[in-house]
Amino acid sequence: MTPLHQLEHHAEAQWQRLLDTLAQATGMPGVYLARCTEVELHVLSTNQGCPPQAAAGERFPIFDLFCEQVMRQAKVVQVEDVAADPQWQSGREASAGVQCYLGMPVRDPQGEVFATLCLFDTKAHPLPEAWQSLMRSVVAIIEGELAMLSLCRELDGLARQDPVTGLANRRALELGLPAMKEWGLRQQSSLAGSHPLGVVLMELDQFAELLVRAGLSGAEHALTLVGQVLGQSLRPQDMLVRWSEARLLLLVSGVRSEDLLAQAEQLRCAVQRLPMLDGEGMGLTVSMGVMVWSGEGHLPISLLEQRLRQAQEAGHNRCVMARSELPFAGPAPLDQGEQAVKH
């Protein structure tokens, strides 16, 4: 479990304790936290011993529910005697046995209504003003937890992102690789001839010259442009990573060898079509080392680097693909160990 997941689990446990405390303080048998969308109500958490009208995890279609009104109106809804209230006496919750209700909105860090905190009973009775004060205290704690979770998610996202290009970084790759392997293995059963993963190591050609002519900011801007154009054609289950100063690493889940090479070629051509850098008269191209991978062991970076060097030594702006997934013992002629696409 990642630190963020641990924090989310802690928040959920905290909400459970708060609902239990609120139930004990008010004597109300049912206390729950729920979200409403356009189509349904989702009960996020309840107090222990909550009556069956609300159970954690349950979802109900939206249709004249108390919580729906709380979220739509963004204000407290209070009904002390449902059976005596013309608006609610024939509603779904009255039919389910709810006779007393008090609901209050809970807002997210952006100020939008996130959920409702609700008290209910199967018997009608007064709802003291002091209970709303208690609820406001609980709402403030929950809203504080939501703000902390939002900040932690933002920080977690930044920790997985290269600050220059906005691409995923090595930490994101480390955390996301197991799920990519699993998805690729599932694809093998439905896509004949596919491999769990395809891997492409690419480097911006003449990066050293670009550094001299355009400076660090210009070179990084060029790499950012390349990352943007490559990212436009990727699927959600694929990942593009900034691997080093001038290198990007692409992982493609569930792919056949010929499809991987074709995709690499399309990406190479997309980079080549980028306009020249302003004032530098330099076009952008990339060289690529390409291979399919079973997902076992460590990433085959050494083999990919050898194929990348072969592409560069052959004149840049091309792909060299290793045919085998097996560890590469040493350089081999192109017609024996790999496939080259030259331009």
Image (cartoon, rainbow, N blue to C red):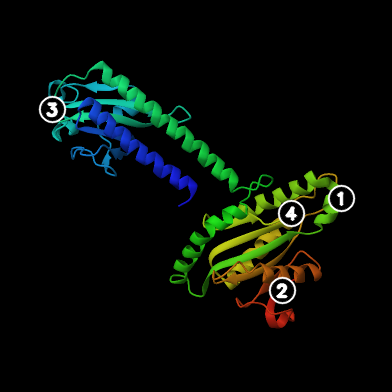
Q: What is the CA distance from the residue labelled 3 to the residue labelled 1?
A: 79 Å
Classed neighbour count for the residue bearing mark 3: other residues with Cα under 10 Å, few (<14), some (14–19), many (≥20) = some
Relative to 64, 160 lies left or right:
right
Residue 281 seen anywhere in this rendered image of the structure: no
Q: What is the CA distance from the residue labelled 4 to the residue labelled 2?
A: 25 Å
Labels 1, 2: front one: 1
Residues at circles 4 and 2 in contact by the CB criterion of under 8 Å? no
* Mark toward the start of the polypeptide (2 vs 3): 3
**Which image quadrant for residue 22?**
top left
| Residue carrying label 3 | 123
Which of the two residues, 68 or 176, is positioned nearer the viewer here?
A: 176
Which of the two residues, 3 or 256, is positioned nearer the viewer here?
A: 3
* Mark toward the start of the polypeptide (3 vs 1): 3
**Which image quadrant for residue 14?**
top left
- Amino acid under disc 1: Val
- Amino acid under disc 4: Glu
Secondary element under disc 1, as helix, strand or loop, is: helix
Which of the two residues, 154 or 92, is positioned nearer the viewer here?
A: 154
- Amino acid under disc 3: Lys
| Residue carrying label 4 | 245
| Residue carrying label 1 | 212
Residues at circles 3 and 4 in contact by the CB criterion of under 8 Å? no
* Mark toward the start of the polypeptide (4 vs 2): 4
Labels 2, 3: front one: 3
* Mark toward the start of the polypeptide (1 vs 2): 1
| Residue carrying label 2 | 340
Labels 4, 2: front one: 4
Up the image or down, 295 lies above or below 43; here it is below
Classed neighbour count for the residue bearing mark 2: other residues with Cα under 10 Å, few (<14), some (14–19), many (≥20) = many
Classed neighbour count for the residue bearing mark 1: other residues with Cα under 10 Å, few (<14), some (14–19), many (≥20) = few
